[in-house]
Amino acid sequence: MAPAASRLRVESELGSLPRRALTQYLLLLKLYPVFTKAVTSGILSALGNLLAQMIEKKQKKDSQSLNVSGFLRYLVYGFFVTGPLSHYFYLFMEYWIPPEVPLAIVKRLLLDRLLFAPTFLLLFFLIMNLLEGKDVSAFAAKIRSGFWPALQMNWRMWTPLQFININYVPLQFRVLFANMAALFWYAYLASLGK
C-alpha cells in the first residue's frame, strides 16, 4: 500500500473514534443507565477537582504534587451520589411534572432551583466533610461560611443551564449535560474547600 493511502486509512479511522465512542456510550446508557451515569459523573467530578487543583497550583506558582485524596473524594462523590441521584431526580421530575402540564417549564425550573439545588449542595458539603474525616463542628463551620455563597453562585451559574437541561435536553442525556457543566462547578466548589 502506498504511504498516502495508509495515511488516509489511519486518518479515517481516527475520525471514526468519536463516533464509535458515542455509539458505545449510547449502548451502555441504554443497557446500564444508572451505572453509566455514575461512572461518567465520577470521572467528570474528579476531573473538575483536578482542574481546580491545577488552577490553584498555577495561581500560587506551587511546585507541590496534586492532592490525590481530593481527586478520589470527588470521584467517589460523583460515582455514588451525583450520577445516581441526578438520574432519579430527572426521572422523578419527568413523572411529576410532565412536559404537557401547564407552565411545566417554570414548575420544573422552580423545583430544581428551590428544592433540589439547596438539598444537593447541602449533601455535597456533608459527604465531603465525611470523606475528609472531619467532625460535625467542621461541617457546621463550613455550612456557615460556604453554603450561602455557594448557593448564590449555584443559582447564578446553574439556572440558565438547568432551564435548558430540564426543558430541552432529552431525558437520557440530562445527567451528561449537567456533568459537563459541573466540571467547572466542581472546580469552583473545590476552591471553597481551601
Image (cartoon, rainbow, N blue to C red):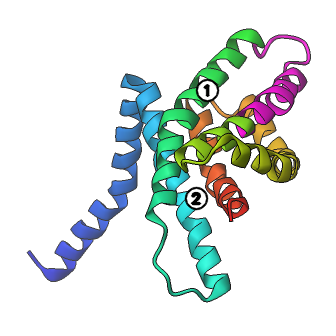
Outermost left residue: 1
User: In the image, what residue occupies the spot 74% across and 37% down?
Assistant: 122
Q: Position of residue 115 (x, y in %)?
A: 82, 26
User: In the image, what residue occupies the spot 64% across and 76% down?
Assistant: 56
Q: Is residue 94 magenta?
A: no
- Quarter of the image for residue 101 reads top right
Image position of 100 with respect to 114: above or below: above
- Quarter of the image for residue 184 reads bottom right
Image position of 144 with respect to 36: above or below: below
Q: Position of residue 137 (x, y in %)?
A: 73, 45
Mark 2, Cα crowd under 10 Å, few <14 / some 14-19 / many 20+, is: many
Q: Which residues are magenta?
A: 98-121
Q: How many marks?
A: 2
Q: Nearer the viewer, residue 63 or 132?
A: 132
User: In the image, what residue occupies the spot 15% across and 81% down?
Assistant: 3
Q: Secondary structure at mark 2?
A: helix
Q: Is residue 110 magenta?
A: yes
Give me the disc on residue 171. Answer: 1
Q: Nearer the viewer, residue 88 or 21?
A: 88
User: In the image, what residue occupies the spot 50% across and 55% down?
Assistant: 46
Going by the image, does 190 lie left or right of 108?
Answer: left
Q: Position of residue 117 (x, y in %)?
A: 78, 35
In the image, what residue type sits under mark 1? Answer: Leu
Going by the image, does 160 lie left or right of 96?
Answer: right
Magenta stretch, main secondary structure class: helix
Q: Secondary structure at mark 1?
A: helix
Q: CA distance from mark 2 to mark 1?
A: 23 Å
What residue did someone put label 2 on?
48
In the image, what residue type sits under mark 2? Answer: Gly
Mark 1, Cα crowd under 10 Å, few <14 / some 14-19 / many 20+, is: some
